[in-house]
Image (tube, grey):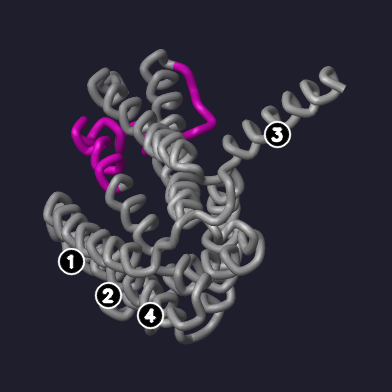
């Protein structure tokens, strides 16, 4: 194969890879400045991997061994709804469990719920977008240099050659909406875990997650233009944000635990005061 993968395509892959890393990094910095703790971010990352990549896939492993799987995959509508339900059930349950257990003592600061969402959606972006783009970049460079690669063969090269350069940016556009949705759903589940009277927000988050995933799968399977699909997803993301803001305004309470930075400063001040007292004595 004498052709080479365009430099513009490799550049687009690089931009997408950077965006996948930059978004969670920026969100992390923002919410740290607002007083959120470190723990929720990393808890979100680990919880996503555990519930989406381990438990959910394990459930699929058993379902695929049944006759029901043929029925599911034989109908696009059913496939989209089941896939959306599985994603919603496992990911939102993961959020709820994390908020009730690991982050139980962090619920005094509502910004920790948003920090969790940044970690949950952020690690998904790094794994699904940045990691895949980095592998494609490495393969492209090796292919263009005439070297063999363990990351793919001629079929992979042909696929990259046939893909328009702008298509490599679609994933970045998608991840922006996805992280927005993750953070919005985190707000709903956060207050469901924090206040028993708001428990209904937890099943609502599952249904909303089901909706957005099912719509995306069904539209994609129907051959709808990718930008139309992204437009629909962005409209849903905006609606989720509006709902999350309304829930936040109604349920948000003033922080009752000192942020990490303030705690450290208080300890330093206390040590200084103690030293001064000893000198005066």
Distance in Å between CA atoms under marks 4 and 3: 58 Å
Q: x, y (%) of residue 180?
A: 32, 52
* Residue at image location 70% in from the left, 34% down from the top: 267
User: According to the image, label 4 marks what residue?
Assistant: 72
Q: Label 4 to label 1, Cα distance in Å? A: 16 Å
Label 1, label 3: how many angstroms apart (C-alpha)? 60 Å
**Sequence-wise first label, 2 or 3:** 2
Left or right: where 36 falls relative to 78: right
Q: Quadrant of residue 250?
A: bottom left
Q: Is residue 38 magenta?
A: no
Residue in the picture at 21% in, 30% down: 165
N-terminal-most mark, 1 or 3: 1
The crowding category of the residue bearing disc 1, from other C-alpha atoms within 10 Å (few below 14, some 14 to 19, many at least 20), is: few
Residue 23 numbered tag:
none
- According to the picture, the residue beneath numbered tag 1 turns out to be 222
Image depth: mark 1 or mark 3 in front: 3
Give the structural element (helix, strand or loop) at label 1.
loop
Judging by the rendered image, the residue that carries numbered circle 2 is 76
Local crowd at mark 3 within 10 Å, few (<14), some, or many (≥20)?
few
Q: Could you tell me which residue is drawn at 46 percent across and 80 percent down?
A: 199
Provide the major secondary structure of the magenta segment.
Answer: helix
Q: Are marks 1 and 2 in contact (CB under 8 Å)?
A: yes
Stretch of the chain drawn in magenta: 147-174
Residue 131 in view in this figure? no
Horizontal and vertical percent position of residue 143: 40, 21
Decide if residue 264 is on the left or right side of residue 69: right
Pointer 3 residue: 267
């Amino acid at each position: 194969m004498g052709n080479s993968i365009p430099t513009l395509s490799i550049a687009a892959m690089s931009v997408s890879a950077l965006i996948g890393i930059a978004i969670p990094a920026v969100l992390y910095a923002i919410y740290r400045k607002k007083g959120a703790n470190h723990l929720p971010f990393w808890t979100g990352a680990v919880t996503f991997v555990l519930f989406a990549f381990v438990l959910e896939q394990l459930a699929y492993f058993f379902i695929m061994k049944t006759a029901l799987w043929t029925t599911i995959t034989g109908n696009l509508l059913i496939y989209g709804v089941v896939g959306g339900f599985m994603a919603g059930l496992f990911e939102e349950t993961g959020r709820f469990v994390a908020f009730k257990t690991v982050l139980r003592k962090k619920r005094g600061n509502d910004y920790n719920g948003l920090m969790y969402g940044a970690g949950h959606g952020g690690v998904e972006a790094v794994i699904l977008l940045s990691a895949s783009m980095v592998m494609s970049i490495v393969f492209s460079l090796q292919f263009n240099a005439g070297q063999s690669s363990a990351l793919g063969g001629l079929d992979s090269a042909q696929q990259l050659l046939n893909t328009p350069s702008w298509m490599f940016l679609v994933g970045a556009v998608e991840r922006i909406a996805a992280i927005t949705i993750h953070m919005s759903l985190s707000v709903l589940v956060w207050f469901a875990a924090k206040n028993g009277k708001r428990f209904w927000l937890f099943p609502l988050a599952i249904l909303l997650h089901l909706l957005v995933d099912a719509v995306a799968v069904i539209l994609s399977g129907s051959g709808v233009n990718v930008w139309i699909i992204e437009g629909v997803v962005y409209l849903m993301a905006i609606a989720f944000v509006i709902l999350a803001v309304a829930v936040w305004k109604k349920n948000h309470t003033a922080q009752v635990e000192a942020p990490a930075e303030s705690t450290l400063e208080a300890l330093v001040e206390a040590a200084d005061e103690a030293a001064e007292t000893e000198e005066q004595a």
